[in-house]
Amino acid sequence: MAHQLKFDPLSPEGAEIVALYNDIRENIQDAEGGWNGADTVEAVCDWFIRLGVDVSTDGAVIPAA
């Protein structure tokens, strides 16, 4: 199945999404296509931190607008 992206992978934001996806596929995905949950959560947390999100907050929402 071909990807049907709903974002521009060439935009700065899209490039970050692609980088996260490719990192998980290359470093976490097993031979059967599964993603280890703990490793995936760690990768997503690291990704948020790289983007400047404080993952240690008490759940404060980031305003969208």
Image (cartoon, rainbow, N blue to C red):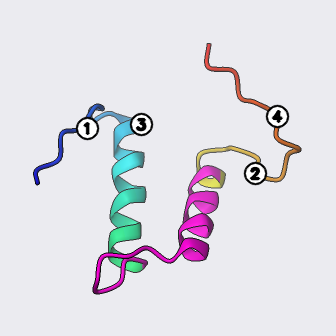
Q: Is residue 42 magenta?
A: yes
At a point 30% along the width and 32% down the height, the residue shown is 7
Quadrant location of the C terminus in the rendered image:
top right
Q: Nearer the viewer, mark 1 or mark 4?
A: 4
Region in magenta: 28-48
Is there CB contact under 8 Å for labels 3 and 2? no
Q: Quick check: marks 1 and 2 in contact, CB under 8 Å?
A: no
The residue under the point 33% across, 63% down is: 22
Of labels 1 and 2, earlier in sequence is 1
Packing grade of label 4 (10 A; few <14, some 14-19, many >=20) is: few
Q: Amino acid at mark 2?
A: Val
Mark 3 residue crowding within 10 angstroms, few (<14) / some (14–19) / many (20+): few
Q: CA distance from mark 1 to mark 4?
A: 30 Å
Q: Residue at x 38, y 37 (%)?
A: 12
Q: Position of residue 32 (x, y in %)?
A: 29, 83
Relative height, residue 33 to residue 5 (above, below): below
Q: Mark 2 — residue?
A: 55
Horizontally, residue 41 falls left or right of residue 11, namely: right
Give the alpha-carbon distance from disc 1 to disc 2, as whole Å. Answer: 26 Å
Q: Position of residue 53 (x, y in %)?
A: 69, 44
- Three-letter amino acid code at disc 4? Ala
Residue position marked by numbered label 4 in the rendering: 60
Kindly state the secondary structure of the residue where label 3 is placed: helix
Q: Secondary structure at mark 2?
A: loop
Q: Amino acid at mark 3?
A: Glu
Seen as rendered, the residue at the extreme right is 58
Estimate the x, y position of residue 40 in percent, counting from the top left: 53, 68
